[in-house]
Every structure is written in structure tokens, then in C-alpha cells.
Image (tube, helix red, strand yellow):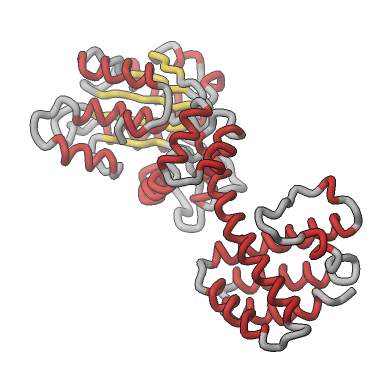
Amino acid sequence: MLFRDILGNDPVKKELLRTSLSGRISHSQLISGPEGSGALLMAIAYAREILCGAQLKNVSACNIKVSGLKHPDLHFIYPVANNPEIKSRAISSNFLTSWREFLNSSPYGSLFDWYAHLGIENKQGKIGKDEAEDLIKKLSLKPYEGGWKCVIIWMAEKMNSSATNKLLKLIEEPPKKTLFLFVSESPVLLMDTLLSRCQRIDLKKISVHEIEKGLLNKGYSAEISKQAAFGSDGNYNKALSFANRSEKDSLFEGWFQSWVRSAFKVKRDKEAVLELVDWSKNVSKQGRETQKSFIRYSLAIFRQAVLTNYGLDQITSYRPSTDFDFQSFSKYIGGANIEDLSIELEKAHSQIQSNGNPNMVFSDLSLKLTRLIHKT
């Protein structure tokens, strides 16, 4: 991770780069910023400059280690809790593989995204005393590569008082050439004694223009990039979620329209069943998460159709992006079939989740749709 890879906050990047080059590095710093501003990435890029910037040899090898989050002198602490894989001693080092996967897939990810990745959405992750004790042991060792040691503590506001007090002692008398980077979205929740010992660096929200440019560079369409950036409130993670959802919705819209058109044709042309067979084969080739998402999407569209059928289209959000006549389609979805349609879609969702054969599930669902769609 390099400074140039991070969206926005150019003045902060320049200042951090200046301090790393000058060698005047405060051993305890707090990088704070709102969700989706890239505070964690800023900390990693700064650590890379400290660990690799001064090296005259093997700079590329050092950069690769930091980018892969595998540099032996780069330590991470983050909120964790026991999950089905780690049932005791929940400390960061036991979740390192998951952490690398998470940052690789969601570099601007939120705390909730991290909890979801670990499968602990219903728990409160924390940074506890065991974490601090584990770090103290690591820092008692000499640097593996003879230079600096960097510690990045993400979501530092999740430290409990025991962990904070233990780290305070370490910060007051830090090992030589050791840098502590605390990363926080809510620094007001940190203990005053910790705040008073940190040099503070505040990030701003990312501008709409920079978010739009970032999305365009990732290959999203101009329209989706503009919409996602405008509604992001400076949160690039939120913008990415919107853009991904929009692209998926566009894909799902095509599937849905093809599906119901073929289902309608079956009544007057039995050969149209073959179209449904081909459609089912195509959808069954997708990943299970995509299949489940499509079923949820279809259920939402059927419910929007009911509202439109009953003259409540002013409160619906679905607007076809193609020539699909949603008004005419909606006349076929009402009280006589919406409950059965919902039941069948929920059943299909459950079967996919339980590792049912996707081709059989969607073929069966398609045949039922041909009957239910004409039930008025």
C-alpha cells in the first residue's frame, strides 16, 4: 500500500511522507478519520515508508512484505471475539489469515464488515488485556530486519481499560525505534491519558470528485460512479457497496425479465419451457451467494409489483432501466398469487443455502412460476 493508492487527504500524505524522510518520527501517533476515509490504509502506507523507505537494498522485497501484510516487523491489533474457528484466546495473531483476506477484499471496510467476515456480527469485538500482553512479548524481541518495528492498532476505541493501561506503560517507555499508530473513527472514546501521549493526525471525508474518479478507475460506469459518489457522504466503502449493488441489480434485472417473459410464453407456446431450462442452467452456473441474492431481488420485485397493481406505485422504488412494461406485468401479481410466489422463492432460497442442486432448484421454481403467474 502506497500513499498514491489512497483516495484524498493529499496534505496528510505529504506531511507523513515528510516526517518519514526527515527521521523526526513521533513514536506514538493517532490517525483518526470518519468511516470510509482510508485511515487504516494511511497507517499502513506510513508504516511502509518507515520500514522500507530508508533501506538502500531490497526495497522491492520490503514493499511486497508490507503489501501482503507479512512484514515481520509490522504488527496489527484489531477487535476480535471467539468464533467457530477460534473458540478461545481471541487475540489478533490468531486471526491474521482472516485479517489479510479482509484487507485484500475490503481495504476500506468498516468494523461491521470485519465482524461479518469473522462471522461474529452478533458479538462485540474488543481489544483486551491478553492482546496487550501478547504485544508486549513481541516487542521485547529485536526487529527481524534490524530497523523499525511498527504497531498498527485499528479501531483503538475498542480497547478496554486493562489493555489501554498496559499499553500506556509501553508508550511511556517505548522500545527503541518502535512506532505505535492508533487508528480510530471515534477518538472521543479513547482515554484522555492515551490521547495526551499521541501526536494526532485527522483525516477529512473524501470528496465526491475523488470518489467518483476512484470508481471510474475501478471500471464502474460513469453513471453508477456518479450516483455512488453523490450518495456516499465521503465514505468510499459506502460508495463501493452502492456501486457493486447497482451493477448486480442491473444483472439481476436482465435475468428477472428474461425469466418472467419465458414463463408467460409457456401458456401459448409449450416450446418456451426449453427457454426456462436454458435460463435455469445459466443461473445455476453462478455462485451460491449470487443465486441467493437473485432470489431476494426477485422477491422484492414481485412485492413492488403488488403495490403497483393496487395503485400504490408512487411509493415503489423500482423503475425498469429497459423497455420492460412493469405496469402490465404488475397486473398479474396480486392477492391470488403473491403469497404462493413468496413461499416458493423462500423455499428455493433455503434449498440453495442448504447446498441443494441449483439447476434442479431453479428448474422447479421456473415451472411453478409458469403456473402461479397466471393464478388470478
Residue at point 49% right, 33% down? Answer: 211
Q: Percent position (x, y) of residue 373?
A: 80, 74
Q: Percent position (x, y) of residue 97?
A: 36, 51
Identify the residue at the far left of this view.
57
Residue at point 54% right, 45% down? Answer: 243
Residue 303 lies in what quarter of the image? bottom right
Could you tell whether 330 is left or right of 129 in the image? right
Frontmost residue, 1 versus 155: 1
For the C terminus, the quadrant is: bottom right
Identify the residue at the far bottom of this view.
270
Q: Percent position (x, y) of residue 118?
A: 49, 50
Residue at point 57% right, 38% down? Answer: 228
Q: Percent position (x, y) of residue 137?
A: 29, 35
Frontmost residue, 99 versus 37: 37
Could you tell whether 177 is left or right of 102 in the image? left
Frontmost residue, 13 versus 124: 13
